[in-house]
Image (cartoon, rainbow, N blue to C red):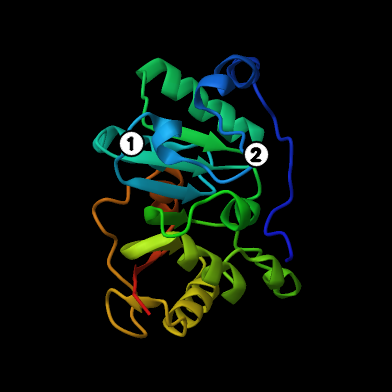
Amino acid sequence: MIRSFVRRSGRITLAQQRALDTLWPQYGVTADGILNFTELFGRNVPTYLEIGFGNGEALLAMAQRHPEFNYLGIEVHSPGVGHLLLQLSAQQLLNIRISDVDAVLVLQHHLPPHSLAGIHIFFPDPWPKPRHHKRRLIQPAVVKLLATVIQINGYLHLATDWPDYAQQMLQILDTTPEFINHSGPGYFTPRPPQRPLTKFERRGHRLGHQVWDLVYRRLEI
């Protein structure tokens, strides 16, 4: 399967690097096999996954808003991971764990079947050049993987500000039998209030960028 990302080191601050060195044992996930969420979080409550959390702004907001839930975040870029680790330490949040492994590998090898109450994929890399569209994360094979780890009646929530990627997502999800469109076939969903507005999105609004949300429920088939 073609990777949907290029692992870039980026510019990492001394504080972020220190967080990676000292806080990863508390918040990081290193799994050789299937994760046990009860052991990982120390409790048995619904768990939500965010793939590609960037600097962690949305993930942090959701975990603060819902301390009764567990949140697992996946991000391969070290500066974003370090930034979130600093925030978790400062706010003493205990309901987030982080993986820096390729999301497809996590879906394939490390998540129990039908174990997640929901999955969030907000503003994945659009790979805007047509020759790179094959690298986009939302492809039929990946959507099938997502379906295997979401509970029956759980949900998949995606958002993008690239119109052609939004249409691609809509077409793929609407033709995946394991999912049903919350707003009906062919329709996007108004931004659900539970999706936090990030600095990235607010900046896009000021520039006149539109955002498309898609929400799907996992069916029992």
Residue 194's x, y, as percent? 26, 50
Q: Residues within 10 Å of mark 1 (few under 14, many from 20)?
A: many
Q: Is residue 61 above or below residue 200?
A: above
Residue type pointed to by label 1: Ala
Which quadrant of the figure contains the N terminus? bottom right
Quick check: 131 above or below 6?
A: below
- Look at label 2 and name its amino acid: His
Residue drawn at x 34%, y 74% is 219
- Quarter of the image where the C terminus is located: bottom left
Other residues around mark 2 within 10 Å, as few (<14) / some (14–19) / many (≥20): many
Mark closer to the chain start, 2 or 1:
1
What x and y, as percent, mark residue 173?
A: 45, 77
- Relative placement, left or right, of 125 versus 95 is right
Q: Residue at x 37, y 85 (%)?
A: 186
In the depicted structure, whether residue 107 falls above or below residue 131: above
Q: Position of residue 23 (x, y in %)?
A: 55, 18
Label disc, if present, on residue 77 of the rendered structure: 2
Q: Which mark is residue 88?
A: none
SS at badge 2: loop
Specify the quadrant of the image occupied by residue 79: top right
At x 44%, y 53%, the residue is 204
Give whichever of 32, 11 is nearer the camera.
Answer: 32
Q: Nearer the viewer, residue 183 or 95?
A: 95
| Dots 2, 1 in contact, CB < 8 A | no
- Asked whether residue 174 appears in the rendered view, the answer is yes
SS for tag 1?
helix
Answer left or right for 9 relative to 45. right
Residue for badge 1: 63
Q: Does residue 161 show up?
A: no
Q: Quadrant of residue 4?
A: bottom right
Residue 20 in the image, given as x and y percentages of width and height:
62, 22
**Between marks 2 and 1, how big is the CA–CA gap?**
20 Å
